[in-house]
Image (spheres, coloured by chain):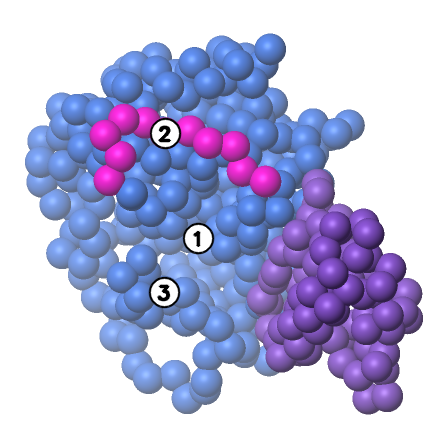
Chain colours: A purple, B blue
Amino acid sequence: MKFKVSPSVVSRQVGDEIMLMDLQSGTYFGLDPMGAEVFRAIESGVDPESLGAEWADKYDASTDQIAADVTGFVETLRDKGLILSADD
Amino acid sequence: MTFDFVRQPPSDQLPIDAKPFDRWLSTEGEECSLFFRDGGNFRLRFNDLADFTIDLGRRLVTGTPTKGLPEEVLEHLYRNQVVPLVMGHDGELVLHASAVGIGRQAVAFLGSSGRGKSTLAASFSASGNPFLSDDGLILDQRDGAYFVCPRYPGLRLCSDSAAEILGAPSSPSSLVTAKNYIPADASLQHSDETLPLAAIYILVPPQGVDAPQIHSLSRAAAVAQMLQHSFILDSEDADRIEHLFDQLVDLSAHVACLSLDYPRNFTSLPAVLEAVRDHLEEVQQ
């Protein structure tokens, strides 16, 4: 499934992290390096579910583990209104 | 940026027939300030203290104190709360922080009300490092460096801090506030020199440490803290919020941001001053 960043959200690279700010709610979040990569993938229109196989070697973890971590992270972003389904 | 300030006669704070769009809470979680829209302008209510209307078009602030409010408290609210909000709205970078000069540089202490910003500023000042500002810290950015713009030569201190640090008589200045306004003098030195900002020390909630603790912060953590302690007049203005976000991201790239915790008692203050001075020497190397 593809997603898009919510229109009210801006992102900035701050040191090693990406900070997201929801200009509508005034809330902000910091993403660690892996979270930042997932977010950048979403920004680029990449389906995050495709990242599992690609990242298994990179992060020395199983494809299933990567997929579970990415899925959980994407759900968090969605729950907080930071990303929307690309069809919305 | 110039605004005219007009004082109205004291008045009771009548209910406002509108819903606030923002509010400030004390560290205890109590509502202390309310923000209202008034056409294209703003109305601020500092509960039990004063109301201010901000007419941006006419660049006019009107202050109405509650009955019995000392003039100095109204003046303090205007200078250290309203003016920073207006300046922030105008695009200036203004933080809820105090600042002192150490040598040829400035350091800032950022944090919520009651965390010790003014007490630290007074303690440094009484020991030879003049304070530059209290409460509303205005920063000027030039060629990648940030400079502290000095402000009013006075601090607001709790009476026990004033007595302990300055030997001031312990007397309440007001029935509704617990702080005294202390003007600068020989024992409380103020400097009006613009100095480059070398470090921002963010006063964290006391963790019960037994000695001063200074720790590096990630830039993202520092930006998050500075967002919490910025003066934002219109929290619903997305463009201004984004501009502030960019300002703070840039600030975090050019000025060291640290967390500071220390035992919250007066006997520990000399050790805090020494720790900050020593740390500043490391930052400068």
Q: Earlier in the sequence, mark 2 or mark 1?
A: 1
Residue B257 image point, x, y percent: 55, 34
Give the SS element for disc 2.
Answer: strand
Give the SS element for disc 1.
Answer: helix
What span is in magenta?
B208-218
Specify the subunit that label 2 lies on.
Answer: B
The residue that label 3 is drawn on is B25
Contact between labelled residues 1 and 3, with CB atoms less than 8 Å apart: no
Q: Nearer the viewer, mark 2 or mark 1?
A: 2
Residue B264 visible, this angle: yes
Give the CA separation, mark 2 to mark 1.
Answer: 29 Å
Nearer to us in this view, B254 or A18: A18
The residue that label 2 is drawn on is B213
Q: Is residue A33 found left or right of B163 in the rendered image? A: right
Give the SS element for disc 3.
Answer: strand
- The local crowd at label 3, few if under 14, some if 14 to 19, many if 20 or more residues have their Cα within 10 Å, is few
Residue beneath the point at 15% across and 39% down: B159
Residue beneath the point at 29% across and 47% down: B114
Residue B54 image point, x, y percent: 53, 65
Residue beneath the point at 22% across and 45% down: B179
Q: Tell me, for residue A36, which label it has, or none.
A: none
Is residue B210 in the magenta section?
yes
Give the CA separation, mark 3 to mark 2.
Answer: 27 Å
Specify the subunit that label 1 lies on.
Answer: B
The residue that label 1 is drawn on is B81
Give the CA separation, mark 3 to mark 1.
Answer: 14 Å
On screen, residue B53 above or below B246: below
Which quarter shows the C terminus of chain B? Answer: top right
Q: Is residue A15 found left or right of B24 in the rendered image? A: right
Q: Is residue B30 found left or right of A31 in the rendered image? A: left
